[in-house]
Image: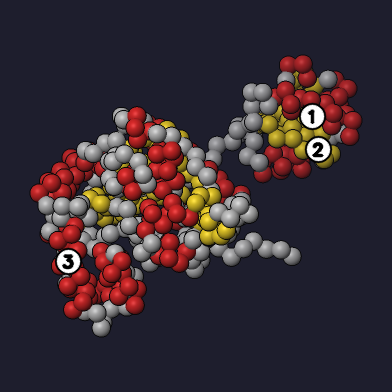
Amino acid sequence: MISSLRGMNDILSDDYERFTYFIEIATNVAKRYGFHFIETPLLEETALFKRSVGESSDIVGKEMYQFIDKGENDVCLRPEGTAGVVRAFVQKKLDRAGGLHRFFYHGAMFRYERPQKGRLRQFHQFGVESFGEASVHEDATMIMMVSDILKTLGIGYRLQLNSLGDENCMPQYRTSLIKFIESMEDKICEDCQRRKTTNPIRVLDCKNQACQEIYKNAPKLVDNLCDGCSNDFTKLKKILENNEILYEIDTNLVRGLDYYSKTAFEFVSDNIGSQSAIAGGGRYDKLVEFLDGRATPAVGFAIGIERLMELIIMPENARNGYYIGAMDTEAIDIVVELAQKKRKTEKTVIDYKVKNLQNHLKAADKVNAKYCAVIGSHEMKNKTVWIKNLEDKTEQIVEVKNF
């Protein structure tokens, strides 16, 4: 028997209902905020992610599904969604068009990492990207949008917030952080020693518990912000407070990708174990420029769908539509014809197997139909259809021509 690859799961039945319900809710919220759908390819040039996500990141260094295709192109399956949207934004020359461009997307991403609960090698994200607005109000809008999605789904969360500074304050902070790392070099892990030269701020994101204890005493970027970044961060907090969005400051929150600057945020849940992040994002004002576009302010977020699945509170599933079945072989053709007509206005499920009434009622109940309609020899003789409303248990007989 051939099985699915490790970390690549099928989505069936109950999980499928939760999955599609999430997409529906998230899409509706994004549209209410004025965002439009974008679809980018699953396969991109590897260079796209090396230049955007950053070669110092674990994603590029360890986790990409990368290969040489038949045309000798170095390609990989997308490990995240933002880089592809930025590539499309530049390729379509929207960076030169000016104005505000807002997109949302959802789809599969791929990372070769150790599969665990809520974290697969093929996983799905819902993401939002906004281009052309430098105001911190847009950062707040991203956070409020995630909050709206999670609240609609009945998911509790804690919002963690930080500022990563910009080119005015990051260099000075980077120097002081490197000095601290060097003073602790014999006590930190190999990954942190490597990151010291590639992207030192990423050491703050280390998952090694011993390193985390050390970095509690590291200099804090939020204490070293320039006036512009400090004012923006203060304003962001005020906007969230005015809109009743609770938050906590996490001075070690840096996100896992190299392209972030200024605002960084994560939504975490206390109900999914140690891997508690369920959504995150921030500002990336330099990424469009890094990918050969015109300098364009940008901010966005992504939600890991698999991580939310067991947290989603599903609405009560009301009965709807018709189930139509035959109690006599000669009735099957009539049943098919009626079902096809009914589908123009109603959800209609058909069963081609001849069954007695009791088994048809059970089958109708199983598909959560509101009405069970059957035709047997008696109904064929009288050109009628027997119908039962499975909600109020009433029964009626109607002529076929009126069905």
Local secondary structure at mark 1: helix
Q: Residues within 10 Å of mark 1 (few under 14, many from 20)?
A: some
Q: Quadrant location of the N terminus?
A: bottom right
Which of the two marks, 3 or 1, is nearer to us in this view? Answer: 3
Local secondary structure at mark 3: helix
Can residue 293 be seen here? Answer: yes
Amino acid type for the residue under numbered disc 2: Tyr
Q: Which residue is mark 1?
A: 336
Q: Is residue 190 left or right of residue 216?
A: right
Instruction: Identify the residue shown where x is 29% and y is 64%.
Output: 199
- How far apart marks 3 and 1 lie (CA) works out to 74 Å
Question: Does the residue at mark 2 contact the one at mark 1 (Cβ under 8 Å)?
Answer: yes
Can residue 104 be seen here? Answer: no
Local secondary structure at mark 2: strand
Query: Residue 352 got which mark?
Result: 2
| Relative depth, front residue between 233 and 201 | 201
Tell which circle, 2 or 1, labels the residue nearer the N-terminal end: 1
Amino acid type for the residue under numbered disc 3: Thr
Q: Where residue 27 appears, x then y in whole percent?
A: 44, 37
| Relative depth, front residue between 104 and 312 | 104
Q: Quadrant location of the C terminus?
A: top right
Q: Which residue is mark 3?
A: 175
Q: Where residue 8 appears, x then y in whole percent?
A: 58, 59
Residue furthest to the left: 227
Amino acid type for the residue under numbered disc 1: Val
Residue furthest to the front: 72
Residue 253, picture quadrant = bottom left
- How far apart marks 2 and 1 lie (CA) works out to 8 Å
